[in-house]
């Protein structure tokens, strides 16, 4: 068989083509429809959810307490010095973690927000470097992947915003930032509208970069290889970093990486193996200057690029309607190659002026993506009238292949200023202002080709969509300590958000489809949301607390591309969250629990809708929704060398009603239908055991997770993504400055479905988790 580098095809620009989609849009394997569930029984269902969740926490506490008591009994026979040394190793990760979830440094156990932290070094050690590789490790976090390089997160069934060092990454293309450049990933669950602004209805995913150190010179090198089920060739990874302290006040850190992810999806139509292989490279330069205790400056300069092919698999090919086998797709002539580039400059200034802690964060991100998408079902017959020389007869109808070349160039400029001061050791005042300017012009080139041979006929149409947006906001957050144990946090935010939408159409498309105004009118949408936060907290001890959280969030509305029967804009979405949480550390920090019960009300949600008559896709009002559930995370170290971590989520996210002027929503959904990509039950458990190994320290690590059944976007028939389980295993050793490990990801080689494309584009395709991968990593540190 031939091996074609899909990333090289992406360089050629919009002249690459692919064949038409000839399949039946309603007949693919894995499709299904579930009727509305009994809404009247949800109270009983919710009660069972909470009961099982509480039982899970109690069983975990009892089991881990017993293990810790046994460990303490064993340690009682040690000498005092040995016992002290052993106990010093017991401090689990959760009790020592410092996070910036509330835009200030706090211990994780002191933050009155459900927060999960992913250690970036653990991701690189297991070669889990893409978003789809690690999202299932976080409670209530879901991942969605689709055409035109769209990928992103949702939390608790609602949308989430992704940030890099507190600078938001807007739009639907969230980059796979290499974890080698990161310290950690903080996931805040629940609305965070007061501190983080619009767009995070369900929560926030904040990627935090590594800081330089002025203390000592250090360096790190990592290299590895891996093979994947059905892989055509080997994957490889190379990373390096060096920290250079120039003086006691200035240091900088340089890091870089290069990797190839082995392709594992074949295209039998083109006789190509590993068509989804991708390659990535990039680096991060960070400078840190602290001339005094009252001032510091940090500058990040980031660059990374990923080129590859689409990761979706198809149930049948689009030319012959022939069923395809495992790990196959039916695209032709270059559809799928993408090029994703991210550059970023982030400047953080911190100072102390007049007893105010002042922080300034300036960010400038450029997210540039190009790729190819199949649009033959929409434009195939129209293109055939202009380019009959490339058309073929399909069911007696002349049809041309129509690949769509997309070029998205998004720039984000943000400025945030924060001031914090404590008055009389009782009142913490935290105020700030925020400005963002987003420019995301998108250029679409609609090509016409022969769906069999790929011969190019010409350009059928062009679309230019400038989408400027601005956001200006002011916020305040006050915390008053009534006693050393009880405090109350109150916050609010006022924002002004304005965006503009316009479509400029060119080419023969204008004549074929009778476009009367190729330069469409500018459509403007603006909103002035106010969000709030109210959080009383009671501390039983320094490491144990209970809190209640009332918070709201807001997602601005937008404009739809003009078209026949298309509403000019869709309205904003609002959420309100009612939550009770508990965090605690027990048994001398050997056991940590983080649990919360929540209920989120979502008002005026919008949903993509495909009109099969006009073949237009646009956002419409879909009514109201509710998301409620329980999350519980337990981490324990019953011995100094064993760490056990598990979490469980019971959730119920569903529609509760429709807009006042509708008896049913535009996508065919009914009251009680589940929200998109929301699982009713998920679970994760991991164990990490260390042991002496001939003078070295060996370790064994295993992680298993379960994601329940989920549903695709609202449409008929609605896509169903079956439940799946995934287990990863890692074994290795450290000896001085050296470390090595062998990992097996997806041990059972499951085909877990992450998401699928919408009905309007490629309804027979699915995006799946990576098949079983086996790899070896070697690392050296200085």
Image (cartoon, rainbow, N blue to C red):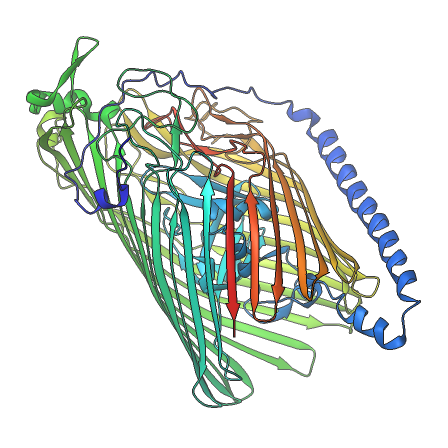
Residue 298 coordinates in the image, percent (x, y): 43, 77
Residue 327 coordinates in the image, percent (x, y): 42, 29
Residue 262 coordinates in the image, percent (x, y): 39, 43
The part of the image, by quadrant, that contains residue 479 is bottom right
Instruction: Point out the residue furthest to the top here.
Output: 396
Closer to us: 249 or 271: 271
Closer to us: 66 or 58: 66
Residue at 61%, 64% in the rendered image: 734
Residue 136 coordinates in the image, percent (x, y): 56, 44
Q: Is residue 198 left or right of residue 364?
A: right
Please count the marks in the image: 0
Residue 201 visible: no
Closer to us: 665 or 646: 646
Q: Is residue 249 above or below residue 628?
A: below
Q: Is residue 50 above or below residue 388?
A: below
Q: Is residue 680 left or right of residue 261?
A: right
Instruction: Point out the residue furthest to the front here.
Output: 694
Q: Is residue 696 left or right of residue 586?
A: left
Q: Is residue 113 above or below residue 573?
A: below
The part of the image, by quadrant, that contains residue 748 is top right
For the N terminus, the image quarter is top left
Residue at 53%, 46% in the rendered image: 135
Residue 455 visible: yes
């Amino acid at each position: 068989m031939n091996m074609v580098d899909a990333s090289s095809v992406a360089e050629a620009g919009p002249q690459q083509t692919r064949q038409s989609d000839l399949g039946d849009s309603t007949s693919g394997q894995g499709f299904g429809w579930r009727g509305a569930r009994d809404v009247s029984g949800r109270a009983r269902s919710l009660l069972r959810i909470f009961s099982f969740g509480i039982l899970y926490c109690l069983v975990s506490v009892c089991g881990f307490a017993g293990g810790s008591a046994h460990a303490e009994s064993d340690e009682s026979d040690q000498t005092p010095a040995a016992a002290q040394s052993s106990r010093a190793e017991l401090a689990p990760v959760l009790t020592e973690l410092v996070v910036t979830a509330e835009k200030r440094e706090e211990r994780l156990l002191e933050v009155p927000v459900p927060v999960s932290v992913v250690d970036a070094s653990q991701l690189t050690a297991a070669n889990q470097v893409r978003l789809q590789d690690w999202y299932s490790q976080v409670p209530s976090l879901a991942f969605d992947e689709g055409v035109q390089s769209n990928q992103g997160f949702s939390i608790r069934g609602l949308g989430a915003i992704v940030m890099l060092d507190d600078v938001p990454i807007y739009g639907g293309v969230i980059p796979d930032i290499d974890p080698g450049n990161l310290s950690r990933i903080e996931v805040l669950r629940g609305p965070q509208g007061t501190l983080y602004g619009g767009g995070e209805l369900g929560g926030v995913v904040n990627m935090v970069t590594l800081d330089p150190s002025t203390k000592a010179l250090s360096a790190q090198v990592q290299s590895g290889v891996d093979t994947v089920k059905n892989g055509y060739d080997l994957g490889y990874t190379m990373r390096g970093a060096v920290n250079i302290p120039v003086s006691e006040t200035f240091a900088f850190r340089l890091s870089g990486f290069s990797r190839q992810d082995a392709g594992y999806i074949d295209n039998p139509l083109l006789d190509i193996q590993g068509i989804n292989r991708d390659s990535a490279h990039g680096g991060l330069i960070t400078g840190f200057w602290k001339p005094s205790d009252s001032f510091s400056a940090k500058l990040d300069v980031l660059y990374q690029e990923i080129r590859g092919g689409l990761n979706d698999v198809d149930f049948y090919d689009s030319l012959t309607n022939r069923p395809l086998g495992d790990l196959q797709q039916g695209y032709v002539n270059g559809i799928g190659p993408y090029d994703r580039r991210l550059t970023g400059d982030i400047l953080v200034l911190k100072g102390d002026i007049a007893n105010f802690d002042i922080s300034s964060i300036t960010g400038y991100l450029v997210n540039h993506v190009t790729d190819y998408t199949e649009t033959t079902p929409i434009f195939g017959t129209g293109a055939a009238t202009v380019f009959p020389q490339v058309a073929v007869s399909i069911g007696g109808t002349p049809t041309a292949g129509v690949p769509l070349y997309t070029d998205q160039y998004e720039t984000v400029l943000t400025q945030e200023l924060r001031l914090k001061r404590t008055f009389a050791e009782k009142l913490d005042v935290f105020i700030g202002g925020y400005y963002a300017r987003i420019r995301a012009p998108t250029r679409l080139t609609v090509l016409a080709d022969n769906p069999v041979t790929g011969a190019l006929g010409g350009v059928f149409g062009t679309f230019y969509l400038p989408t400027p947006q601005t956001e200006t906001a002011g916020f305040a957050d006050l915390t008053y300590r009534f006693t050393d144990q009880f405090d109350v946090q109150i916050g609010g935010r006022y924002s002004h958000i304005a965006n503009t939408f316009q479509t400029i159409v060119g080419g023969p498309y204008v004549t074929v489809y009778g476009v009367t105004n190729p330069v469409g009118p500018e459509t403007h949408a603006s909103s002035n949301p106010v969000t709030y936060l109210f959080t009383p907290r009671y501390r039983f001890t320094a490491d144990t607390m209970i809190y209640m959280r009332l918070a709201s969030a807001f997602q601005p509305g937008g404009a739809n591309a003009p078209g026949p029967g298309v509403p000019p804009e869709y309205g904003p979405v609002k959420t309100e969250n009612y939550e009770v949480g508990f965090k605690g550390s027990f048994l001398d920090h050997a056991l940590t629990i983080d649990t919360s019960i929540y209920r989120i009300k979502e008002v005026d949600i919008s949903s993509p809708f495909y009109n099969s008559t006009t073949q237009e896709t646009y956002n419409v009002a879909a009514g109201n929704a509710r998301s409620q559930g329980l999350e519980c995370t337990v981490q324990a170290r019953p011995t100094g060398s064993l760490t056990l971590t598990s979490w469980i989520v019971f959730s119920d996210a569903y529609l509760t009603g429709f807009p006042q002027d509708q008896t049913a929503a535009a996508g065919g959904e009914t009251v009680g239908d589940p929200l998109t990509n929301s699982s009713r039950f998920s679970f994760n458990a991991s164990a990490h055991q260390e042991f002496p190994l001939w003078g070295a320290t060996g370790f064994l690590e295993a992680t298993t997770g379960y994601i329940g059944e989920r549903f695709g976007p609202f449409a008929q028939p609605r896509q169903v993504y079956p439940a799946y389980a995934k287990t990863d295993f890692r074994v290795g050793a450290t000896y001085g400055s050296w470390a090595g490990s062998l990992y097996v990801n997806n041990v059972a080689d499951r085909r877990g479905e992450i998401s699928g494309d919408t009905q309007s584009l490629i309804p027979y395709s699915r995006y799946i988790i990576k098949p079983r991968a086996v790899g070896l990593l070697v690392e050296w540190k200085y």
